[in-house]
Image: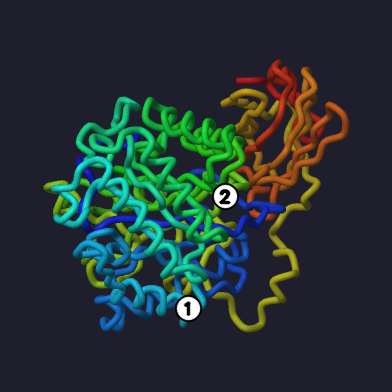
């Protein structure tokens, strides 16, 4: 489950990206870390770009003078969002007097390094300048419109997407009672902000962003209903951000289904402010759990075609907002206090189907080793079948409306390793696979054929592998009742 937390401090925000790049063949591996041959990728940025996804970070421009910070910022990310430099108190410190110094620094950094720029945030009940406190409802409404118009116009052509409205809902799904915008203007302020932003910048993507919405719950459903209403009435909205400030071991089980239901409304989605904290001190076990969780979140985004990418809320634990808000907790980011890569780094890389080791492999082959395209002499032929009656399949489904996500586990219950596998089954209710991961999946009529991906063809005796797919149904979604692995009928868990 996602963590309930107080209103966000000034040192956290995130980004939503605009350009929707369909993922023709998303590569996602199972929950356990897998050693995969590198494809000469030198950074997370390279892997994400190759997958058609963004990987972003929240920037404090004051840190760019620190060489280690700037080196990572330059090389590892293809998207940047300002932590605080574009918020209302920073851009309009006195009424109708605008200040874009640090915001322009972030925009210039994005342009000079070829990164996409995400704007954060036009309207947020927190970090509003003090001069707004005395405004009446109509005056605050006018000031909000003026602010949105001026800021969106200033960054027009530079910002690809905006968090137009941030953190508008409470945990119970109702509008926030502690928001001056909600108290003085009422429910309509969100629609007003979106319409005003569209008028100021017709090309930027317009997003709503919130926290504790990663799972299907009252809060995320309230935002879902708002987006559905906006789409039905023609109110401009293009994307939804999920902040994902998580605790190790608590990635929500319904997170992928949740993102997919928003995507099915016709909007893009994004993990906007990812960090995964732990009770301090950290240790190898906690860091391993954190790595698996980071990997899982990236896998979830990769599995949802309209998920534009993931933004990490910062670079180094040295500057994380977490310890200052959650006493005794920290180590939430991908680089430690000394800018050393943590296990989460390689876990993220593996979620994109490749891995960039942080140190050279200790088993580096001699220069006389045959080319990597030559199969190792000890590798059994890929056609090796499993012993008879040696497999078990677990088929789990999360479904909504006329869509569903299936997660399938294939277990080798025999006493011999399996090298290369093909799973076949038939849909009993006319379902169709629309996107698959961790496999090569084809369908002919009701018959589905699933072959291993390049990296998960080997299943040891007693071991298992996982793959998944999104599908569509017409209202009936009966699970397949029979599976065969390399021609052998499997038991069904």
- Applied colour scheme: rainbow
Residue 371 placement, left or right of 137: right
Q: How crowded is mark 1: few (under 14 residues within 10 Å), some or many (20 or more)?
A: few
Give 437 or 56, whichever is nearer the viewer.
56
The tag on residue 338 is none
Residue closest to the far right: 445
Residue under numbered circle 2: 302
Give 152 or 28, whichever is nearer the viewer.
152
Question: Which image quadrant is residue 212 in?
Answer: top left
Q: Which image quadrant: the N terminus?
A: top left
The residue that appears at 41% across and 29% down in the rendered structure is 222
Instruction: Calculate the distance from the C-alpha at mark 2 to the C-alpha at mark 1.
Output: 26 Å
Give 74 or 79, whichever is nearer the viewer.
79
Residue under numbered circle 1: 111
Residue 253 placement, left or right of 450: left
Residue 462 seen in render: no
Residue 26 placement, left or right of 361: right
The residue that appears at 67% across and 53% down in the rendered structure is 23
Q: Percent position (x, y) of residue 433?
A: 74, 35
Element under disc 2: helix
Give 408 or 284, whichever is nearer the viewer.
408
Number of numbered callouts drawn: 2
Q: Which image quadrant: the C terminus?
A: top right
Question: Which image quadrant is residue 98 in?
Answer: bottom left
Q: Percent position (x, y) of residue 181?
A: 27, 41
User: Which of the two discs, 2 and 1, sits closer to the camera?
Assistant: 1
Q: Give whichever of discs 2 and 1 has the lower sequence position.
A: 1
Mark 2 and mark 1 in contact? Answer it, CB < 8 Å. no
């Amino acid at each position: 489950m996602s963590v309930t937390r107080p209103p966000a401090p000034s040192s956290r925000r995130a980004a939503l990206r605009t350009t929707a790049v369909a993922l023709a063949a998303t590569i996602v591996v199972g929950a356990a870390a897998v050693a995969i041959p590198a494809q000469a990728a030198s950074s997370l940025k390279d892997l994400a770009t190759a997958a058609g996804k963004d990987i972003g970070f929240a920037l404090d421009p004051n840190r760019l003078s620190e060489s280690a910070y700037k080196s990572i910022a330059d090389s590892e990310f293809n998207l940047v969002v300002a932590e605080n430099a574009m918020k209302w108190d920073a851009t309009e410190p006195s009424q109708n007097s605008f200040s874009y110094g640090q915001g322009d620094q972030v925009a210039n950094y994005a342009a000079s390094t070829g990164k996409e720029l995400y704007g954060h945030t036009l309207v947020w009940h927190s970090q509003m300048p003090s001069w707004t406190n005395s405004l009446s409802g109509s005056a605050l409404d006018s000031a909000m419109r003026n602010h949105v118009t001026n800021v969106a116009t200033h960054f027009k052509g530079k910002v690809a997407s905006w968090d137009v409205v941030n953190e508008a809902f409470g945990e119970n799904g109702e509008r926030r009672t502690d928001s001056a915008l909600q108290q003085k203007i009422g429910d309509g302020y969100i629609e007003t902000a979106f319409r005003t932003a569209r008028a100021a910048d017709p090309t930027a993507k317009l997003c709503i962003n919130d926290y504790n919405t990663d799972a299907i719950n009252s809060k995320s459903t309230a935002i879902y209903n708002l987006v559905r209403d906006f789409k039905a009435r023609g109110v401009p909205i293009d994307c939804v951000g999920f902040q994902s400030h998580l605790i190790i071991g608590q990635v929500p089980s319904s997170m992928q289904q949740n993102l997919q239901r928003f995507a099915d409304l016709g909007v893009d989605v994004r993990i906007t402010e990812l960090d995964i904290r732990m009770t301090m001190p950290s240790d190898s076990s906690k860091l391993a759990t954190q790595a698996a969780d980071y990997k899982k979140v990236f896998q979830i985004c990769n599995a949802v075609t309209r998920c534009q990418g993931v933004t990490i809320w910062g670079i180094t634990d040295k500057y994380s907002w977490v310890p200052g808000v959650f006493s005794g907790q920290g180590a939430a980011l991908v680089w430690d206090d000394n800018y050393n890569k943590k296990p989460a780094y390689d876990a993220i890389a593996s979620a994109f189907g490749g891995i960039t080791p942080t140190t050279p492999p200790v088993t580096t082959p001699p220069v006389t080793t045959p080319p990597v395209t030559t199969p190792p002499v000890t590798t059994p032929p890929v056609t090796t079948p499993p012993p008879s009656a040696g497999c078990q399949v677990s088929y789990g489904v999360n479904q909504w409306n006329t869509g569903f996500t299936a997660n399938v586990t294939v277990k080798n219950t025999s006493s011999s390793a399996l090298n290369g596998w093909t799973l076949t089954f038939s849909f009993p209710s006319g379902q169709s696979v629309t996107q698959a991961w961790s496999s090569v999946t084809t369908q002919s009529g009701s018959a589905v054929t699933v072959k291993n991906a390049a990296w998960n063809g080997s299943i040891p005796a007693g071991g298992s592998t996982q793959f998944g797919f999104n599908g569509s149904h017409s209202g009936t979604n009966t699970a397949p009742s029979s599976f065969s692995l390399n021609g052998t009928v499997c038991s069904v868990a």
